[in-house]
Amino acid sequence: MLRLFSHRESGQTLVEILVAVAILGITAVTFFSGFTTSSDIVFSVDERETGKNIAESQLEYVKSQTYAASYVPDIIPDEYAGYSANITVSSIASRDGNIQKVTVIIKHQDKEVSRLEGYKVN
């Protein structure tokens, strides 16, 4: 007698296929969310490092100027569009006004990304 169907045939049921697709979907979502998070972190680190470099150059610029009550920030190159610098100066009273504390604040799109403090001597 010819048997068309055997009880030992193996095949995949609809439930098994749905479970496999669900596992693949969860894996894909996890991978892409991790990729998005890592790209956000890279952008944030780049933004802070650029702000630090601009702050250092602004502080060096102030130190190269003659001793004054206030300083105008140096021009930030076009390649750093969106960054701005603010320089504040305060005299240290205990030193007869011959030392200034210089604070440079760098902002990127109105968000502070770097703050650097230094001293200038008359």
Image: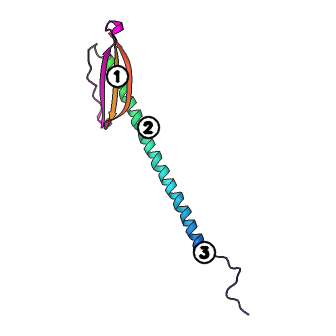
Q: Residues within 10 Å of mark 1 (few under 14, many from 20)?
A: some
**With respect to residue 80, does 95 lie above or below?**
above
Instruction: Name the secondary structure under disc 1.
Output: strand
Total numbered circles: 3
Q: Of callouts 1 and 2, which one flags the residue occurring earlier in the amino acid sequence?
A: 2
Which residue is drawn at the image coordinates 38% and 24% (left, top)? Answer: 116
Q: Of callouts 1 and 3, which one flags the residue occurring earlier in the amino acid sequence?
A: 3
Instruction: Name the secondary structure under disc 2.
Output: helix
User: What's the amino acid at mark 3?
Assistant: Thr
Q: Position of residue 23 (x, y in %)?
A: 56, 62
Which residue is drawn at the image coordinates 36% and 27% (left, top)? Answer: 55
Q: Residues within 10 Å of mark 3 (few under 14, many from 20)?
A: few
User: What's the amino acid at mark 1?
Assistant: Thr
Q: Which residue is mark 2?
A: 45
The image quadrant of residue 52 is: top left
Q: Residues within 10 Å of mark 2 (few under 14, many from 20)?
A: few
Which residue is drawn at the image coordinates 57% and 66% (left, top)? Answer: 20
Residue 112 among magenta residues: no
Residue 89 among magenta residues: yes
Residue reaching furthest to the right: 1
Residue 55 badge: none
Q: Which residue is mark 3?
A: 13
The image quadrant of residue 64 is: top left
Identify the magenta region.
72-99
